[in-house]
């Protein structure tokens, strides 16, 4: 594939950082190499020396002085080599990507570690999309993706979905506004990419079937679309996984976003895709200097302008990466799989509790499809045209927090009768109470129903971890919320 049409002008103008090139050479050099090239600080002056992290299974993860130095030091842009290699092995086992054995230069795969799926997605969008581009997303879709896309100024084309995720006929219908040959003309606004959540869609809990994935892949081939496969709920599937887009990807048109946020610690995620595409992410990570390209609208930073910020994004996750990398090596592939079994079991039983409570309280008042993966139930409240008011006024007053459906709509102004309920953190009792409160509020909002009914419900409950607005603006914050991070911080500080 020729990727040049997918990369936007800003990314195309990026050049490799000379310093980072030297860092990569140094990383591969023998210990005898004397390097005066690196701008890395001397870690002997860092106050943190060692850490012992107690794992839930009773074992320990020890970061001795040497590992601690690695954890605290600047590192490779792509991520800690040990972790990157472990992740590549994992991807090969799980997805058997058709081009796995090929060298990057020959169109093979590569993988980079990012501060989050969200971070990876944002960087990808910013590397690929121009203002005014048409971008295909499913409806409803992840609010964080919409937040990342909207400021770029692209037009969102919404593909219809059902209980099996994105509907291929709807995608074809949207794409048929163009001719496949339009993809060869750079001035044409034919979409370049389709964004999809293949498993446990946030918010609907639906997963794509294999037939659908194959049909979508064919349409992507016909119109030369990249597929951005955002799969943070891959490890939260309640049924046997079907092959991923990456595993169907004979052409190299899939960028796959994985996340450990739901299984190890919020903040550790990776992107996998063709090396030619990922190199623009490295460039982005490194905040490279811009140069004029031939047809460019890019403004070169003037000399007296402030330097772009340092590459703190890559470095910020170094410590987490070392911990996660060491943990995965300590566990081995079998230990990781064992952990995933527990994760699936946990979320499946939470899902059952949520669905049973919905059956108990909301039958006839709400509609839903049982989630097959992930951590969300998507409830359609019958007779309620728009749930925004219900959440922002009525539910909040009763200390119940749900996310109004409009947060997941490409058109945020259209009324939406859905709400998203997360079954990840709430206790059994809270889930039950939540649904009874939704029932009460629902009654309250129906015409002819007085406030007395609502007053009769005196239980004040607090539930659901999400905040409105839904996503923090800066997802680096997620690092600070990870259990693992808190655990090590506490140990270090003592
Ligand atoms: N709510 C997510 N979703 C979320 C959420 C979140 C703080 C995150 C899809 O690897 P990560 O952690 O960056 O994953 C981001 C991501 C990407 N793609 C489909 C997701 O569901 C995470 C974080 C507060 C609320 C949050 O509500 O849905």
Image (cartoon, grey):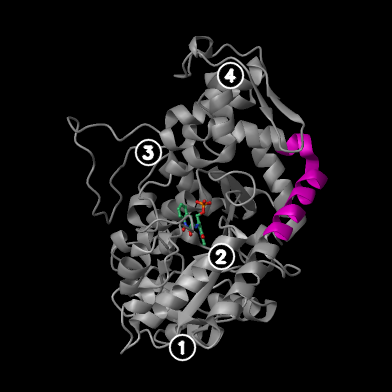
**Residue to which mark 3 is pinned:** 287
The region drawn magenta spans 328-346
The nearer-to-camera label among 2 and 4 is: 2
Mark earlier in primary sequence (2, 1): 1
- Compared with 123, 354 (above or below) is below
Q: Residues within 10 Å of mark 1 (few under 14, many from 20)?
A: few
- Compared with 470, 13 (above or below) is above
Residue at (60, 47) in percent of width and height: 111
Name the element at disc 3.
loop
Q: What is the distance, in whole Å, between disc 2 and disc 4 at their CAs?
A: 44 Å
Mark earlier in primary sequence (3, 4): 4
Residue at (60, 68) in percent of width and height: 200
In this picture, residue 209 sits left or right of residue 257: right
Q: What is the distance, in whole Å, between disc 2 and disc 1 at their CAs?
A: 40 Å
Name the element at disc 2.
helix
Q: Are marks 4 and 1 in contact (CB under 8 Å)?
A: no
**Residue to which mark 1 is pinned:** 173
Image label count: 4
Q: What is the distance, in whole Å, between disc 1 and disc 3 at their CAs?
A: 39 Å
Mark earlier in primary sequence (2, 3): 3
Q: Nearer the viewer, residue 411 or 403?
A: 403
Whether residue 345 appears in magenta in the rendering, the answer is yes
Mark earlier in primary sequence (4, 1): 4
On the question of residue 189 being in view, the answer is: no
**Residue to which mark 2 is pinned:** 431
The nearer-to-camera label among 4 and 1 is: 4
Q: Nearer the viewer, residue 60 or 230?
A: 60
Whether residue 98 appears in magenta in the rendering, the answer is no
Q: What is the distance, in whole Å, between disc 3 and disc 4 at their CAs?
A: 24 Å
Q: Residues within 10 Å of mark 2 (few under 14, many from 20)?
A: many
Q: Are marks 1 and 3 in contact (CB under 8 Å)?
A: no
């Amino acid at each position: 594939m020729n990727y040049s049409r997918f990369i936007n002008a800003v990314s195309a103008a990026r050049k490799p950082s000379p310093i980072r090139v030297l860092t990569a050479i140094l990383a591969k050099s023998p210990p005898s190499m004397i390097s005066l090239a690196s701008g890395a600080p001397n870690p002997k002056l860092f106050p943190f020396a060692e850490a012992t992290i107690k794992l839930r299974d009773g074992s320990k993860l020890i970061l001795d002085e040497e590992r601690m130095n690695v954890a605290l030091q600047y590192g490779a842009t792509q991520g800690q080599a040990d972790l990157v290699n472990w992740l590549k092995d994992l991807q090969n086992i799980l997805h058997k990507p058709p081009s796995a054995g090929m060298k990057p230069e020959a169109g093979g795969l590569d993988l980079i570690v990012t501060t989050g799926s969200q971070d990876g997605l944002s960087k990808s969008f910013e590397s690929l999309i121009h203002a005014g581009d048409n971008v295909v997303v499913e409806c409803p879709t992840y609010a964080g993706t919409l937040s990342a896309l909207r400021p770029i100024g692209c037009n969102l084309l919404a593909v219809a979905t059902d209980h099996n995720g994105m509907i291929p006929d709807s995608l074809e219908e949207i794409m048929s506004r163009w001719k496949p040959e339009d993809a060869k003309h750079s001035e044409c606004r034919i979409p370049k990419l389709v964004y999809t959540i293949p498993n446990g869609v946030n918010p609907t809990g639906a997963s794509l079937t294999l037939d659908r994935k194959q049909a979508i892949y064919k349409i992507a081939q016909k119109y030369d679309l990249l597929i951005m496969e955002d799969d943070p709920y891959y490890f939260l599937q309640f049924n046997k996984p079907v092959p991923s887009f990456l595993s169907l990807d004979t052409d190299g048109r899939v960028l796959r976003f994985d996340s450990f946020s739901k299984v190890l610690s919020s903040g550790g995620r990776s992107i996998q895709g063709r090396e030619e595409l990922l190199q623009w992410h490295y460039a982005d990570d490194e905040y490279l200097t811009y140069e004029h390209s031939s047809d460019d609208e890019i403004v070169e930073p003037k000399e007296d302008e402030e330097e772009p910020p340092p590459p703190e994004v890559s470095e910020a996750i170094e410590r987490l990466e070392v911990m996660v990398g060491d943990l995965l090596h300590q566990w081995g592939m079998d230990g990781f799989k064992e952990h995933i079994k527990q994760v699936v079991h946990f979320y499946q039983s939470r899902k059952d509790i949520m669905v049973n409570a919905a059956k108990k309280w909301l039958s006839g008042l709400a509609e839903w499809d049982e989630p097959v993966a992930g951590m969300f139930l998507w409830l359609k409240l019958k007779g309620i045209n728009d749930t925004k008011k219900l959440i922002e006024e009525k539910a909040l007053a009763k200390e119940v927090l749900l996310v109004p459906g409009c947060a997941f709509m490409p058109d945020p102004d259209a009324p939406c009768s859905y709400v998203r309920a997360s079954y990840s953190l709430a206790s059994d009792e809270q889930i039950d109470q939540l649904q009874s409160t939704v029932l009460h509020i629902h009654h309250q909002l129906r015409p002819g129903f007085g406030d007395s009914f609502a007053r009769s419900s005196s239980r004040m409950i607090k539930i659901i971890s999400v905040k409105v607005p839904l996503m923090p603006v800066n997802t680096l914050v997620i690092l600070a919320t990870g259990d693992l991070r808190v655990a090590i911080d506490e140990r270090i500080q003592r």
